[in-house]
Image: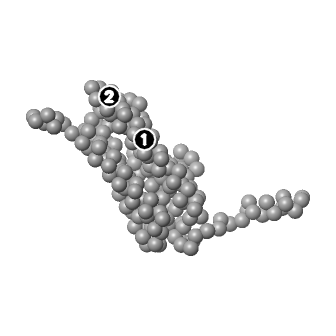
Amino acid sequence: MAKSTTSAKKLQQAAILFPTDLGQQASKDISGAMNSVLADVFALYLKTKNFHWHVSGPHFRDYHLMLDDHGDELFAMTDPIAERVRKLGGTTLRSIGHIAKLQSISDNDADFVEPSDMLAELCQDNVRLTERMRVAHDICDKYNDTATASLIEEWIDQTEQRAWFLFEAGRKVDSSGH
């Protein structure tokens, strides 16, 4: 075997280096927390797109467009989360099965869901995602990982806004028309 091939094979078998000053335990703990967040983001993304595709009724256009925007926001979070885990020396999600093991947001496979129920369920799921991100933020604080914490802070704000929009859009009309 040529020397370059032997060197390449040794690199393939080398232990993961932790290219961060935060240390191996921080990498493990933060990566674990962020992979749980990532699993929930993927679960919420797919549920949001499911409802986007299947919403119906008099508010179809508004809900359809809002859910499409929400799906775009969620999907935009996935790569930065996974890349942050890798920057910390961790590994990230590898499959739908891996997501299923880590997600705390439940799937909705119902044949039909009332639009008001879609909005209420997604509102609660966004609140759940916010809770999960706050836990991850606490872990980042423990290890002084300001880079991951600052990303989480932005995502918490986005997630709270989605929950707010879903809550307001799902409110029943009162006698004043509001």
**Please, what is the three-letter code of the amino acid marked with disc 2?**
Phe
Which percent across, then down, holds residue 49? 42, 37
Q: What kind of element bears circle 2?
A: helix
Of 11 and 73, the residue lying toward us: 73
Q: What kind of element bears circle 1?
A: helix
Image-quadrant location for residue 11: bottom right
Whether 96 is drawn above or below 88: the answer is above
* Quadrant placement of the N terminus: bottom right
User: Residue at 39% across / 42% down in the picture?
Assistant: 70
Q: Residue furthest left?
A: 175
Residue position for label 1: 71
Tag 1 or tag 2, which sits nearer the N-term? 2
CA separation in Å, label 2 and label 1: 16 Å
**Please, what is the three-letter code of the amino acid marked with disc 1?**
Gly
Of 40 and 110, the residue lying toward us: 40
* Quadrant placement of the C terminus: top left
Whether 66 is drawn above or below 126: the answer is above
Whether 39 is drawn above or below 175: the answer is below
Asked if residue 144 shows in the view, the reply is yes
Q: How would you rate the neighbour count of disc 2 (Cα within 10 Å): few for under 14, some for 14-19, many for 20 or more?
A: some
Which percent across, then down, holds residue 54? 38, 29
Image-quadrant location for residue 116: top left
Q: How would you rate the neighbour count of disc 1 (Cα within 10 Å): few for under 14, some for 14-19, many for 20 or more?
A: many
Asked if residue 48 shows in the view, the reply is no
Whether 171 is drawn above or below 84: the answer is above
Q: With 31 as the anchor, is 138 left or right in this view?
A: left
